[in-house]
Amino acid sequence: MRKKLICVLLLLILCFTISSACRDSKKHERNGELESDTTFGTFYSLQNAFDLNLITRKDIQQISEMHTQHEFVFLSEDETVRIKKSYLKYYPRDDVQIGYESVVIKESLGKYNDCYALLLHYNDIGVPEVVGFEMIAGITIGYGNDWRIEIYKE
């Protein structure tokens, strides 16, 4: 009886290990365009980026003005792909198989101290149209939906 119990336990451990390996394999397969040599950046909320001194109050003022006036900065194809791949890696979606093409950069609001100010999201996620505000360093930024500007740093 004891041998059977040990065999069953070993079999369960083996199944769990294989299952975990398969999940990791599928994650890498789903994100197949995430090459091993790609350097991924990090995303920060405006408040967090300000608190970490990645952006200044003056930067926030400029970002707010550009957002309000719908003035956007052109990103190169290389920048766009790097940012989208990083977004995919930073905000993984386990519910569907998607590529970085599913990430939409709605607004590119400039580069500040090697950080990009962006409004981006997955193209299949609906967001309620609600008015919202965010106050950082005494500067109010208004939004027409639930998305928020993020700071991206490589």
Image (cartoon, helix red, strand yellow):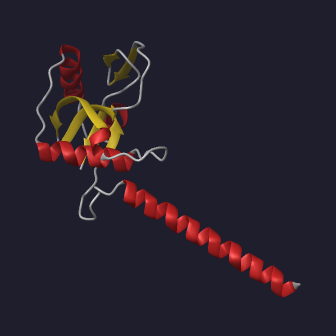
Q: Nearer the viewer, residue 64 or 8?
A: 8
State left or right for residue 102 relative to residue 69. Answer: right
State left or right for residue 125 relative to residue 64. Answer: right
Q: Position of residue 23 (x, y in %)?
A: 51, 61
Q: Position of residue 124 (x, y in %)?
A: 38, 32
Residue 74 in which image quadrant: top left
Q: Name the residue rendered at 19%, 27% in the picture.
A: 58
Q: Position of residue 21 (x, y in %)?
A: 51, 68
Determine the residue located farthest toward the top in the rendered image.
131
State left or right for residue 134 relative to residue 13. Answer: left
Q: Name the residue rendered at 45%, 44% in the picture.
A: 96
Q: How many marks?
A: 0
The vertical placement of 9 against 32, above or below, is below
Q: Quadrant of the N terminus?
A: bottom right
**Residue 53 seen in the figure:** no
The vertical placement of 22 against 94, above or below, is below
Q: Name the residue rendered at 63%, 68% in the picture.
A: 16
Q: Position of residue 59 (x, y in %)?
A: 20, 29
**Residue 73 seen in the figure:** yes
Residue 129 in which image quadrant: top left
Q: Name the residue rendered at 49%, 44% in the picture.
A: 95
Q: Nearer the viewer, residue 142 or 98?
A: 98
The vertical placement of 133 against 94, above or below, is above
Q: Nearer the viewer, residue 47 or 6?
A: 6
